[in-house]
Amino acid sequence: MGPKRIENKRRKFFQTSAALIGGTLLYSLIKPFEALAQPKEEEDPKIDKADLPLWGMGVDIEKCIGCGKCAEACKIENNVPIEPFYFRTWVEQYTVKKNGEVKIESPNGGIGGLKQSVPDEDIFKSFLVPKLCNHCTKAPCVQACPVGATYISPDGVVLVDETYCIGCSYCIQACPYGARFMNPVTKVADKCTFCYHRITKGLQPACVEACPTDARIFGDLRDKETDLVTFLQENPTEVLKPHLNTHCRVFYNGLSSEVR
């Protein structure tokens, strides 16, 4: 066997060995994430989802006074970091000027109240819009999460499992509503949960309970007797960015075309 043939065999051996080692290493890296991405609990086939509530929220823009008590109550109830710019829910002030310019403000998320900064003579119209996670039926954040940390509960609430979250921020980038943030304390994705720890005990979300004008209405969309269903029946409600087809479960009355 000549030296050239020996060299070719040696090269082929090292190439094959490298491929096998690389494949093994890649598998060892991917396998743990495959395990994480599996459903955390097997659904009980005996449980019919139709027997469970399907939680949703209504927001009556015409009743919001911009007091910010909802955002404040949310921060306290859910231990949201006290530093500015971290909110699970917040209130935005929209001001449409006579020249067509739209100014959107939300200092401190609305906590402490919102005050108009545009002179009255320049205002065409002004209104307030509370915002939060829309708990989409077809949630982009769920699709974007590589490890299954973001998921939809059987009763329709989009949640984050902190023990699974790796802090990659993919879900934050995927959310078209800007409703998620990276918690600087826990280092995982954070968002509104409809106060899941409260509603599963028969209580209202903290923001709903704190609202002095009943601008927020929470309830079971499957129960025709709830205030939420009545609200939807009696008002021409809309969802944010309907063209995205995420099938939001937060419904607005009085939503103006300037809202985005």
Image (cartoon, grey):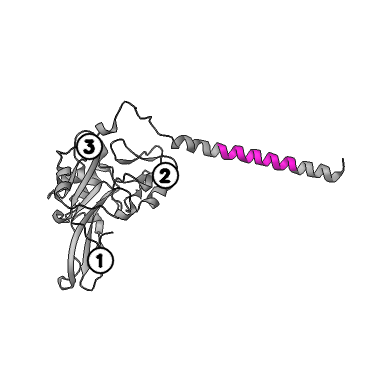
Of label 2 and label 3, which has the lower sequence position?
Answer: 2
Circle 2: residue type = Cys
Q: 64 left or right of 191?
A: left
Task: Where is residue 72? Give x, y as percent.
Answer: 21, 49
Of label 1 and label 3, which has the lower sequence position?
Answer: 1
**Which circle marks residue 140 in the picture?**
none
Residue that numbered label 2 is attached to: 145
Per the model, the C-alpha gap separating discs 2 and 3 is 25 Å
Task: Where is residue 75? Give x, y as percent.
Answer: 25, 47
| Residue nearest the viewer, comparing 53 with 215 | 53
Q: Please report the bounds of the magenta region as a residue range.
A: 12-27
Q: Residue at x 18, y 64 (%)?
A: 126
Residue that numbered label 1 is attached to: 103
Circle 3: residue type = Ile
Q: Quadrant of residue 45?
A: top left
Task: Where is residue 37? Give x, y as percent.
Answer: 44, 37
Q: Callout 2: helix, strand or loop?
A: loop
